[in-house]
Image: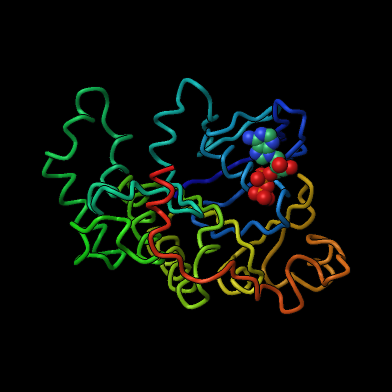
């Protein structure tokens, strides 16, 4: 379990876009936090800042009191699992190899070249595949799987790291509603059962209501709401999404927007890009 402190963190990109205004948030170890906000609100930037993919323009990120910085980036990142909207698998490689990529942060130099040969890694890989429900897919090409299965591989890759923190950037935006709930059940179970501090950005308010302990609402780089899911009122949703004549981005039914049907093979497209 890890506590995450975001202390006056802002991010202005080189092109001058102020994606995050100074943000201060303290996330309790083991909690399940959902980031909500319209496209461009800064959700992705915040998540990327938390695992060191972006450097804050001001402020600092602390994980268990340790400031994330250049010197400890590799060691800190090894403790942070990341799950992506597009799964980010290597489509031509099999499921096990994709999962074991999550172990690379634990190796250095020559060790990482031979990581596949380590029995302990393979055992971990099998345990992870059992956990994400893909035992029978270990040796299949990742791009032959359905979208939901590919996201399970993405989660498996994060679990192979034995993470203290799990970050997921719109992990269900490419999945149908039923599959979305299965994936969210899995992420939630990892948080609750393993005590992994979890931050997930979502488009669907309905899923935030179902899974979050705490919701952070972003709009134009500012935190416009921070509270328990029970406080997510209509007024709060308007604050997060704006009035939008068409009912706001969250839509009249708060999250009927699931981003289309299950797209099997998408990870392969990403890998080929
Ligand atoms: P969200 O995840 O909520 O959609 P993002 O964090 O992706 O929001 O984007 C926040 C703002 O930062 C947007 O205006 C976006 O165009 C801009 N942005 C995101 N990434 C970059 C980048 N690498 N370079 C410049 N601007 C970026």
* Residue 133 rendering spot, x and y as whole percentages: 28, 68
Look at 56% across and 44% down and name the residue there.
4
Residue extending furthest toward the top:
71
Return the residue nearer the eye: 101 or 26.
101
Q: Is residue 42 above or below residue 243?
A: above
Q: Is 222 above or below relative to 13?
A: below
Q: How is the image coloured?
A: rainbow
The image shows residue 226 at horizontal and vertical percentages of 73, 57
Identify the residue at horizontal 76%, vertical 50% (top origin). Answer: 223
Q: Is residue 199 in view?
A: yes
* Residue 45, picture quadrant: top right
Image quadrant of ligand 1 equals: top right
Which image quadrant: the C terminus?
Answer: top left
Q: Is residue 130 left or right of residue 238?
A: left
Give the residue drawn at x 56%, y 40%.
48
Where's residue 49, x and y in %?
A: 59, 37
Q: Looking at the image, which residue is at 40% across and 40% down?
A: 79
Tell me where residue 100 appears, x and y as whole percent. Answer: 26, 45
Please identify the quarter of the rendering in which residue 194 is found.
Answer: bottom left
The answer to which quarter of the image holds residue 202 is bottom right
- Answer with left or right where residue 57 lies relative to residue 77: right
Residue 213 vertical position relative to residue 270 in the rendered view, above or below: below
Left or right, residue 132 beside residue 16: left
The answer to whether one can see residue 25 in this image is no
Number of on-image labels: 0
């Amino acid at each position: 379990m890890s506590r995450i402190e975001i202390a006056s963190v802002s991010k202005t990109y080189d092109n001058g876009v102020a994606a995050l205004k100074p943000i201060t948030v303290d996330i309790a170890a083991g909690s399940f936090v959902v980031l909500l906000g319209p496209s461009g609100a800064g959700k992705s930037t915040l998540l990327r800042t938390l695992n060191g993919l972006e450097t804050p323009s001001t402020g600092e990120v602390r994980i268990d009191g340790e400031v994330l910085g250049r010197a400890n980036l590799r060691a800190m990142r090894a403790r942070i699992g990341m799950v992506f909207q597009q799964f980010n698998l290597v489509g031509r490689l099999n499921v096990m190899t994709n999962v074991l990529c999550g172990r690379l942060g634990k190796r250095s130099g020559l060790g990482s070249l031979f990581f596949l040969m380590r029995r302990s890694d393979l055992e971990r890989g099998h345990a992870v595949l059992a956990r994400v429900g893909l035992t029978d897919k270990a040796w299949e090409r990742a791009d032959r799987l359905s979208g939901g299965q590919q996201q399970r591989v993405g989660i498996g890759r994060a679990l192979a790291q034995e993470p203290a923190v799990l970050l997921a950037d719109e992990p269900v935006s490419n999945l149908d509603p039923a599959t979305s709930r299965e994936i969210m059940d899995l992420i939630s179970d990892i948080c609750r059962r393993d005590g992994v501090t979890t931050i997930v950005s979502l488009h669907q308010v309905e899923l935030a209501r179902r899974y979050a302990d705490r919701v952070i609402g972003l709009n134009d780089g500012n935190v416009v709401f921070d509270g328990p899911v029970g406080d997510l009122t209509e007024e709060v949703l308007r604050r997060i999404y704006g009035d939008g004549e068409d009912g706001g981005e969250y839509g009249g039914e708060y999250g009927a927007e699931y981003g289309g049907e299950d797209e099997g093979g998408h990870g392969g497209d990403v890998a080929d890009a």
